[in-house]
Amino acid sequence: MPPSRPTIADVAQRAGVSIATVSRVLNGTAPVDTETAERVRSAIAALNYVPHAAARTLASRRTDTIGLLLPEISGAFFQPMLRGVEAGVSEAGFDLLIHTTQSRPENAPRRPLGEHNTDGLLVFTESLDAKELTRLYTIGFPVVLLHQAPPNSLNIPVVTIENQSGAQKIVEHLIEVHNCHRIVFLQGPEGHEDSTWREKGYRLALKAHGLTFDPSLVARGAFNRDEARATMEQMLLDGVEFDAVFAGDDDAAVGVYLALRQAGRRIPEDVAVAGFDDQVFASTLTPALTTVRAPTEQVGRDAVHLLARLLKGEQAEPRLVLPTELVIRESCGCRG
């Protein structure tokens, strides 16, 4: 049989102190005089005692772990954001737990990440309902939101990007430079705030140039290649006339490319196409995709930094909005 692992009681007996005193020395939860603390440390060294991680967590109520809740990890969008979160967590000296909510089995715990196993949470849009966010806020548990506003005006910090102005600029480019007047907009998932703000930018650009909003030109793309492709195929079958497509995001733009090519429509000669995010593949498409560059990786890093400030008891900015940038390539009709 292997030798039994020394316990905190063994340390206390060897040092001639109580178990509570050993715990105070280990966790720094209360002052212990120098001589007594030294006896405890000597006993720990002599016995080669290693505190049990779970027990230390219970005693200190700290896990040194940050949780990240996502609805799913799919498409190219999440890769740079996860890089940013990973870098921020490493810089802050924490471990990282990730949980996706859309694939949660029915018998899975309702709160897989929270105050019982993390020190704070990063919550991506559509991955935690308002009731649970309110509960966490009420108990004072640190949370930072990504790409969504807090419910009921709760004072929960948010990190997001400038969606509206980015969308407005790219639609205005299609109108002003390429004389496009029938511009399709593919919405993101229902209720997705990024999509809502991008549609506002789309509508503002139309209004600023005297173009009437046509609801037949707005359809669901869901920030997804397959759904965007199916939507475009249906619009083409329905005979909807358009000279440009603002795909909502780059993943949806790929679906637009596929649908237009299948229908024999040339990009950009017949239809100009634009995306949003400037994902890694955008410049490698043929033709290269005109899009809006979003600092997706920086969103992840900055969200961790805000959460780390909350964990230190410091104030964090209530809303951090990172700028976006227009990236002109060939798919709109410009020369590379």
Image (cartoon, rainbow, N blue to C red):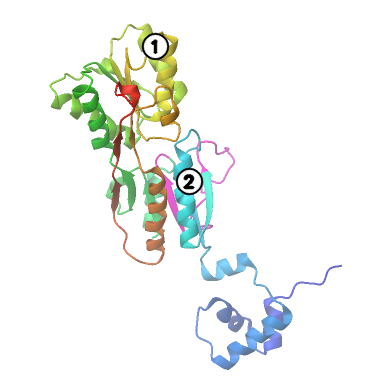
Q: Residue at x 44, y 17 (%)?
A: 258
Rendered image: mark on residue 96: none
Q: Mark 1, residues whose alpha carbon is within 10 Å: few (<14), some, or many (≥20)?
A: few
Rendering coords of residue 122 (x, y %): 43, 50
Q: Residue at x 43, y 44 (%)?
A: 128
Q: Residue at x 23, y 32 (%)?
A: 169
Mark 2 and mark 1: span between their CA atoms? Answer: 34 Å
Q: Amino acid at mark 1?
A: Gln
Rendering coords of residue 57 (x, y %): 56, 66
Q: Residue furthest bottom?
A: 35
Residue 115 shows in the view = no
Q: Which residue is mark 1?
A: 234
Of the two numbered discs 2 and 1 on the same chain, state the one appearing first in sequence. 2
Does the magenta segment cover residue 114? yes
Does the magenta segment cover residue 31? no
Q: Which residue is mark 2?
A: 82
Element class at badge 1: helix
For residue 237, side relative to residue 200 (left or right): right
Position of residue 6 relative to residue 244, above or below, is below
